[in-house]
């Protein structure tokens, strides 16, 4: 399927969502729409794998028989189901009972079956607790099938769901169902719902163009041609992972087998569930990722909250887009926290450096971290200046990249990317001022491929480009009192052309003379018409 067809699928699904959600707000309907798309993917993938596994034994049904073929096999081979499902768990890592497959759900919707809602409720519980070896408890917790927003009673809710699912089934039917296609459609819908949610979207969505920049930066070292081949990343982390798009972009850069395991953490329960679905929908097996629901600032994830340095979890690549200038309430004891002890605590008014230090602590010696932050971290004083100064003196800040304003749904402010390493190759800091490189769009500004490539190429080769990039020595930075405000190092201010006052005055006099002539002409016409004496 071409990129145009992929986009068309996304647009088709968005049009269905926009048409069907009625009075329901975009956030609420998003959870239904994306969950049904997720169920469709799991079902199609399972049925395709079952067909391959059973070979000639896979049932062939009459054209008007709408049952899932695998349901016919289940019914005729009850004694073999256990062995078959064990094999399926080895092949695709999960199983789904035929009655809960999308094809059966869609048929119940098409025939307006009264049991659709009950079947869907049981099916979601089955997938959460029984489909996978590892439990996906609460995966569909944000979808309230008993909600009054669907209808006031069971019959009305069941009827509404029949309509929604039937429309989705019809909309998807003409498109391919492979992982990449549905995964891209899922990402497209997340972006569209993010746009509809305004500022709330910052909780779960990083625009793809920015996600691409971060993911390319943290994987550059592993793709060094001098290595002869890509170096596998053992562990990758996003400690504020939202819908998981950043992690998936890193995986896309490295290939399906280029990462040992993906780790993510997300505080918001809705987006935590979105990220788990997003991983599975993109073909990441449940054994290849781990997403934790919790607060990164409190470090409440057991695998990270390890005081024994010998057992500390370390990551080869870390990406993050944490909430900007988040207000937090650090306790006194947090000053002794192993993440912050050497730097001091970020101020209560802005946890930006607290997020940065959390991730940086778990970065491996050869790893790269790229984090999106507001520009304030570059120049604010007090505690933030002390943290910034230590990171600079320890030679841990590799690059500062300034991006244009209005790239995010959640804020119109310009943001920056800080790139950090524990073992840098260079003693300077690369500044890139890309604030003027963008295309205007209806709602947000956007970066095109050329803008993105210019940033990556400049970073990769540490190029110095007039009014765009500069490698600043630590002495330069020290002379600026460790202020990293980008215009101090790369000023892309464009001087206006000098104005020729004499030429302007001459033009004004010429225009005034023309105006006098026109006034005289008009007066003559009015006299001829007898309108004035």
Image (spheres, rainbow, N blue to C red):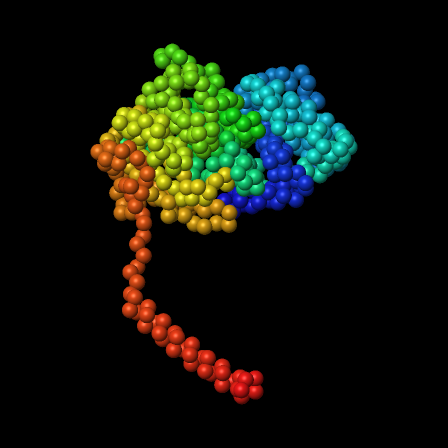
Q: Would residue 165 be visible to someone looking at this image?
A: yes
Q: Would residue 56 be visible to someone looking at this image?
A: no
Determine the residue positioned at 35% across, 38% down. 401
Q: How many marks?
A: 0
Q: Is residue 55 left or right of residue 155?
A: left
Find residue 258 and report its horizontal and vertical position in percent.
40, 28
In the picture shown, does residue 521 fall above or below 91? below
Find residue 18 and report its horizontal and vertical position in percent.
63, 43
Determine the residue positioned at 38% across, 47% down. 437
Front residue (pair 294, 414): 414
In the picture shown, does residue 225 fall above or below 441? above
Q: Is residue 16 left or right of residue 206?
A: right
Q: Is residue 108 left or right of residue 35?
A: right
Front residue (pair 381, 59): 381
Front residue (pair 510, 55): 510
Determine the residue positioned at 36% across, 40% down. 402
Q: Pick out the residue farthest to the left.
A: 475
In the picture shown, does residue 344 fall above or below 18? above
Front residue (pair 106, 515): 515
Determine the residue positioned at 48% across, 24% down. 265
State the image quarter where residue 486 is shown: top left
Find residue 38 and report its horizontal and vertical position in percent.
59, 32
Find residue 439 and report its horizontal and vertical position in percent.
43, 49
State the image quarter where residue 397 is shown: top left
């Amino acid at each position: 399927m071409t990129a145009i067809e992929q986009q068309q699928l996304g647009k088709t699904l968005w049009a269905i969502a926009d048409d069907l959600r009625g009075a329901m707000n975009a956030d609420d309907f998003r959870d239904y729409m994306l969950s049904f798309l997720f169920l469709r993917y799991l079902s199609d993938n399972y049925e395709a794998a079952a067909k391959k596994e059973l070979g000639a034994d896979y049932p062939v049904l009459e054209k008007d028989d709408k049952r899932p073929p695998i349901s016919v096999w289940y019914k005729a081979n009850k004694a073999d189901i256990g062995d078959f499902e064990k094999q399926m768990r080895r092949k695709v890592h999960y199983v789904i009972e035929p009655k809960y497959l999308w094809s059966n759900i869609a048929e119940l919707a098409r025939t307006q079956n009264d049991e659709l809602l009950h079947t869907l409720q049981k099916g979601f519980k089955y997938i959460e607790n029984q489909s996978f070896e590892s439990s996906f408890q609460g995966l569909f917790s944000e979808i309230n099938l008993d909600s009054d927003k669907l209808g006031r009673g069971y019959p009305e809710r069941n009827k509404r769901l029949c309509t929604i699912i039937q429309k989705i089934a019809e909309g998807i039917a003409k498109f391919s169902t492979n992982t990449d296609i549905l995964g891209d459609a899922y990402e497209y819908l997340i972006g569209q719902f993010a746009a509809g949610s305004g500022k709330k979207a910052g909780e779960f969505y990083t625009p793809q163009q920015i996600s691409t920049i971060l993911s390319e930066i943290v994987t550059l070292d592993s793709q060094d041609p001098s290595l002869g081949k890509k170096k596998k990343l053992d562990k990758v982390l996003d400690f504020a992972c939202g819908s998981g798009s950043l992690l998936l972009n890193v995986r896309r850069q490295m290939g399906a087998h280029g990462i040992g395991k993906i780790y993510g953490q997300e505080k918001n329960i809705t987006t935590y569930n979105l990220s788990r679905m997003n991983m599975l929908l993109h073909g990441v097996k449940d054994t290849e990722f781990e997403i934790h629901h919790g607060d990164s600032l409190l470090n409440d994830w057991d695998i990270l909250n390890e005081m024994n340095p010998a057992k500390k979890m370390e990551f080869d690549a870390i990406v993050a887009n944490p909430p900007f200038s988040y207000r937090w309430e650090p306790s006194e004891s947090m000053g002794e926290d192993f993440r912050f002890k050497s730097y001091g605590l970020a101020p209560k008014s802005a946890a930006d450096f607290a997020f940065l230090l959390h991730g940086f602590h778990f970065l491996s010696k050869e790893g790269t971290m790229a984090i999106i932050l507001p520009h304030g971290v570059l120049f604010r004083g007090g505690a933030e200046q002390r943290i910034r100064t230590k990171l600079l003196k320890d030679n841990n800040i590799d690059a500062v990249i300034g991006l244009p304003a209005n790239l995010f749904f959640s804020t119109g402010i310009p943001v920056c990317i800080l790139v950090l390493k524990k073992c840098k190759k260079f003693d300077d800091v690369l500044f890139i001022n890309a604030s003027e490189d963008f295309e205007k769009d209806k709602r947000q500004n956007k970066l095109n491929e050329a803008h993105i490539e210019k940033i990556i190429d400049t970073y990769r080769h540490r190029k110095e480009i007039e009014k765009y990039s500069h490698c600043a020595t630590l002495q330069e930075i020290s002379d600026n009192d460790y202020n990293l405000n980008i215009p101090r190092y790369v000023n892309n201010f464009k001087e206006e052309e000098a104005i020729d006052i004499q030429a302007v005055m001459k033009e004004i006099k010429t225009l005034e003379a023309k105006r006098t002539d026109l006034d005289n002409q008009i007066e003559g016409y009015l006299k001829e018409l007898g309108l004035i004496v």
